[in-house]
Image (cartoon, helix red, strand yellow):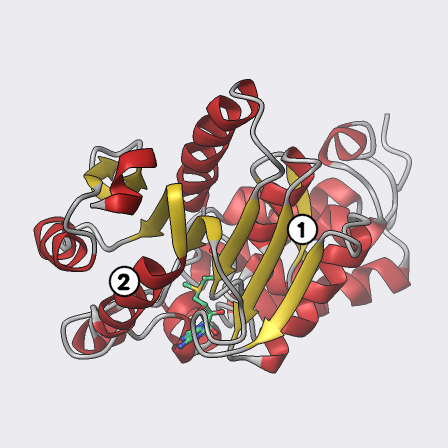
Amino acid sequence: MDDCPAGVTTGDALRWAARNLALADVASPRLDAELLLGHALGASRTDLQLRWTECLTPEAAHALTALIRRRAAREPLAYITGRRPFYDLDLYVAPGVLVPRPETEGLVEEVLAWAQKWRAAGRRPLRIADVGTGSGAIAVTLARHLPEATVAATDLSPAALAVAAENVARHGLGDRMRLVRADLLAGVGGPLDVIAANPPYVPSARLADLQPEIREHEPREALDGGADGLDVIRRLLPQAAERLAAPGLLVVEIDETHGEAVRRLARQAFPHADIAIRQDLAGLDRLLRVSLDNRSESE
Ligand SMILES: C[S@@+](CC[C@H](N)C(=O)[O-])C[C@H]1O[C@@H](n2cnc3c(N)ncnc32)[C@H](O)[C@@H]1O
């Protein structure tokens, strides 16, 4: 039954929104239209299914038009809705910070698997650092899953640190987390049991080829890794080698073309460590994993 004989229904609005996003070449127009319609109405996607024949109020129509205009200009969905699911958390996200990516969840999994063994061995609470924390995605997720760990998270960007601070507060982690405005690990004492980083690693010349959402909206300092993409990793590895305890774990997200180069750099910084390159779900090189065992300390 049509509850809205003369007006625009939510179903009509969805079709209009999806059409406009498709015309703007948005990758998933129907899904984004649904999420933005839900955002305008304060409704979940499941709720929307029950409301297709409802009349859209003028206020909701106005709000939806503004949201669709932003998305059609290829602003990332997460900046518009202010949220992004990451691992098992709902994170706050805003312009000025990298939108957390699904492939970074693999880095979190790698640390949690290692931490489980640490815990099983009855060791003391972990001391963790997250370098280039952005929204705090890695640091906040680790702190939530490792209830005794202390986590220091650094970034150079005040905008990123403001977003991270909001996520720390929303998840009630202020007593175990410290946000530091710093270059890499400067300002974070050692020793550290775990160092995690998703540094900028896109070679500068490749930035122009990225999709508009990234190229025109996400912060360049979160992406640009210099001429070969390795500038930040090259500086981070020796700093990490100075601070990592034994046993200890370093995990760094990398570009899929950097596996061999990063393995070589890691070997220079950590001559005695166990070094591995791990692949993501697409089978692409995605993580550098360096682990020190007890013996590495004295070697
Ligand atoms: C690829 S983003 C990662 C953000 C977040 N960790 C994530 O995974 O979603 C890289 C972050 O590193 C920060 N950054 C870049 N250079 C840095 C440096 N020298 N020291 C500290 N942070 C840096 C950027 O501001 C940005 O927030």
Q: Where is residue 181 drawn, in percent x and y?
A: 58, 78
Residue 133 is tagged as none
The amino acid beneath tag 2 is Leu
Q: In the image, which is nearer the foreground, mark 1 or mark 2?
A: 2
The percent coordinates of residue 45 (x first, y second) are 72, 35
User: Nearest the camera: 148 or 134?
Assistant: 148
Which residue position holds label 2? Answer: 237
Between disc 1 and disc 2, whose residue precedes? 1
Side of 277 relative to 26 (left or right): left
Q: Quadrant of residue 229?
A: bottom left
Disc 1 element = strand
Query: Is 24 on the left-hand or right-hand side of 146?
Result: left
Q: Is residue 289 visible?
A: no
Which residue is the extreme one toward the front? 298
Q: Nearer the viewer, residue 271 or 216?
A: 271
Callout 1, which amino acid? Leu
Q: Which residue carries the number 1 mark?
A: 91
| Quadrant of the snapshot with the C terminus | top left
Q: Residue at x 24, y 36 (%)?
A: 278
Quarter of the figure with the N terminus: top right
